């Protein structure tokens, strides 16, 4: 029974599935998987990543754990008719997620290389919500962090799993949700707490003095974003050994090949 951690899959389902195969991941055998957010956006198979993980969690609720990232929150906002659609669709890769959910619907054209009109967005929103009614409540209910208890069997210490990090000096229960989803430098440059924090959000090559292989480590911080959102790769990390399986993104494509009628 092994425990694996992954973050920021960003719709790169082929690389993610290969990583799971490479470690012979088996929830049937008791293996656990913790996903630290950003399952969607930018990559071509965001729908497949999200729906597969939600289905797997439903089948194995004691083995599969999903945490909300800033990209899940942006999709929640868009599906709810809130947020900044240009920021989400144009600058954060939300258009790839919407295309993956639209499949071969004619509206898919509107999400290629431009921000659709408000009417087009509303039509797409209603199509997705009607076809996948469980998506919005499932995303909205994702936790912002998970406290992983110590495991005497493996020697694993207690740890905090969170998408982006925490604000140093602020009790966990008083953390601003925006920080848990979005924080960068104020966390990883200043955190010196005793509780290990495992996080994603910032690709490891962008973290201070990264050695160039495996997770980023400093004091009680472990960064595990392999950079799939920037076409680098998916990093699957075994806990507590931090043994790493890294699957590079082999082929860059804006979306899977779907014929639009």
Image: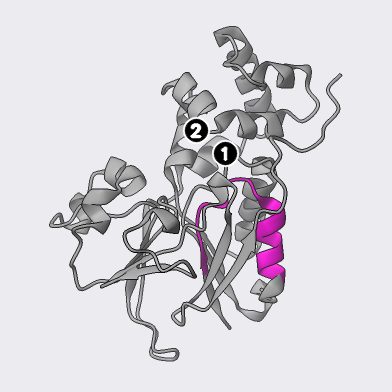
Report if residue 81 is visible in the image: no
Using the image, determine if residue 93 lies above or below residue 217.
Answer: above
Find numbered disc 1 in the image and state the secondary structure of the residue it sits on: loop
Which mark sits nearer the N-terminus, 2 or 1?
1
Q: Which residue is mark 1?
A: 41
* Left or right of 9, for residue 161: left
Q: In the image, is 175 to the left or to the right of 34? A: left
Q: Nearer the viewer, residue 230 or 70?
A: 230
- What percent of the width, then of the height, locates residue 169? 13, 57
Q: CA distance from mark 2 to mark 1?
A: 7 Å
Question: Looking at the image, which residue is at 70% across and 76% down?
Answer: 24
Q: SS for tag 2? A: loop
Going 50% across and 57% down the picture, which residue do you hit? 7
Point out the image quarter for the N terminus. Answer: bottom right
Magenta segment range?
5-21
- Residue 173 image point, x, y percent: 21, 54
């Amino acid at each position: 029974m092994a425990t694996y951690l992954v973050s920021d899959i960003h719709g790169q389902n082929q690389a993610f599935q290969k990583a799971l195969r490479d470690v012979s991941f088996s929830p049937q055998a008791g293996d656990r998987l913790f996903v630290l957010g950003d399952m969607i956006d930018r990559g071509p198979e965001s729908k497949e990543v999200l729906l597969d993980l939600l289905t797997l969690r439903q089948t194995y609720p004691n083995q599969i754990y999903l945490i909300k990232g800033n990209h899940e929150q942006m999709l929640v906002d868009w599906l709810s008719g809130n947020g900044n659609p240009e920021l989400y669709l144009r600058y954060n890769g939300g258009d790839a997620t919407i295309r993956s959910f639209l499949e071969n619907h004619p509206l898919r054209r509107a999400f290629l290389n431009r921000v659709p009109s408000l009417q087009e967005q509303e039509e797409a929103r209603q199509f997705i919500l009607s076809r996948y009614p469980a998506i919005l409540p499932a995303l909205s209910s994702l936790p912002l962090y998970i406290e992983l208890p110590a495991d005497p069997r493996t020697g694993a210490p207690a740890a905090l799993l969170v998408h982006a990090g925490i604000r140093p000096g602020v009790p966990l229960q008083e953390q601003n949700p925006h920080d848990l989803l979005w924080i960068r430098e104020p966390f990883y440059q200043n955190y010196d707490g005793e509780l290990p924090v495992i996080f994603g959000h910032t690709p490891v090559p962008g973290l201070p003095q990264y050695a160039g292989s495996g997770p980023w480590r400093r004091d009680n911080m472990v960064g595990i974003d392999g950079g799939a959102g920037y076409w680098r790769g998916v990093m699957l990390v075994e806990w507590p050994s931090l043994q790493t399986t890294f699957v590079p993104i082999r082929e860059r494509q804006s979306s899977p090949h779907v014929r639009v009628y």
